[in-house]
Structure formats: C-alpha cells, structure tokens
Image: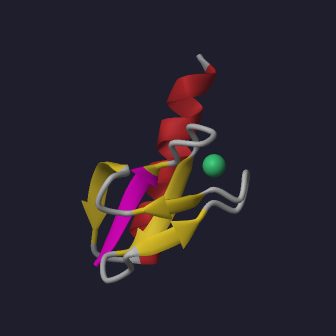
C-alpha cells in the first residue's frame, strides 16, 4: 500500500510506502513523520499514486 501525503515544508504531494514511518521530501529535504503529515490518498500501487499526484497538480494549475 502507498500513501500520498502533503509535505508540511513545501506543500507538495509526495508518495510514500504505507509501511514507512518517515520520508524525506525530495523537494525541500524536510524529514516528514508520516503520522503527522496530511494524507490525501491511499492507493495500492505506485502507478496509481503517481497518476493521482499528476491529477492533483493539474487541478492546482487552474
Ligand atoms: Zn517538501
């Protein structure tokens, strides 16, 4: 399982494995605790997650 979270450093969407406890943001290098990060989606595959992130980014552009 994967989760899509929002970085509390830069506000971007990130993909993390459901089993991970922490994740370093590749954009701003903030170390995120997954328990305190905002989860926006739970998906089964990495492919699904990247589709989701792409769709969210597109929506933000408007
Ligand atoms: Zn970040």
Q: Residue 58 in the image: state x and y as whole percent.
A: 58, 33
Q: Quadrant of residue 62?
A: top right
Q: Residue reaching furthest top? A: 62
In this image, 7 relative to 36: left or right?
Answer: right
State the residue at coordinates (71%, 59%): 29
Q: Main secondary structure of the magenta part?
A: strand
Residue 19 seen in this snapshot:
yes
In the rendered view of the protein, which quadrant contains the N terminus?
Answer: bottom left
Image height of 60 relative to 32, above or below: above
> Which image quarter: residue 19?
bottom left
Q: Would you place residue 2 above or below residue 53 in this image?
A: below
> Can the viewer see residue 47 in this picture?
no
Q: Which residues are magenta?
A: 1-5
Q: Is residue 27 magenta?
A: no
Q: What residue do we see at 63% from left, 56% from top? A: 30
Q: Residue at x 48, y 38 (%)?
A: 56
Image position of 6 (left or right of 35): right
Q: Position of residue 40 (x, y in %)?
A: 32, 46
- Residue 26 pos. (x, y %): 70, 62
- Residue farthest bottom in this picture: 19
22 in relation to 34, above or below: below
Name the residue rendered at 37%, 63% in the picture.
34
- In this picture, is 50 found above or below 47? above
The number of callouts visible is: 0
Q: In this orientation, which residue lies closer to the viewer: 43 or 25?
A: 25
Viewer-side residue, 19 vs 21 = 21
Q: Residue 25: which quarter of the image?
A: bottom right
- Colouring convention used in this rendered image of the protein: secondary structure
């Amino acid at each position: 399982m994967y989760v899509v979270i929002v970085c509390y450093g830069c506000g971007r969407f990130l993909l993390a494995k459901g089993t991970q406890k922490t994740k370093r943001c590749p954009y701003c290098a903030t170390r995120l605790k997954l328990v305190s990060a905002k989860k926006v989606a739970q998906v089964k595959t990495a492919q699904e997650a990247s589709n989701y992130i792409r769709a969210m980014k597109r929506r933000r552009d408007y």
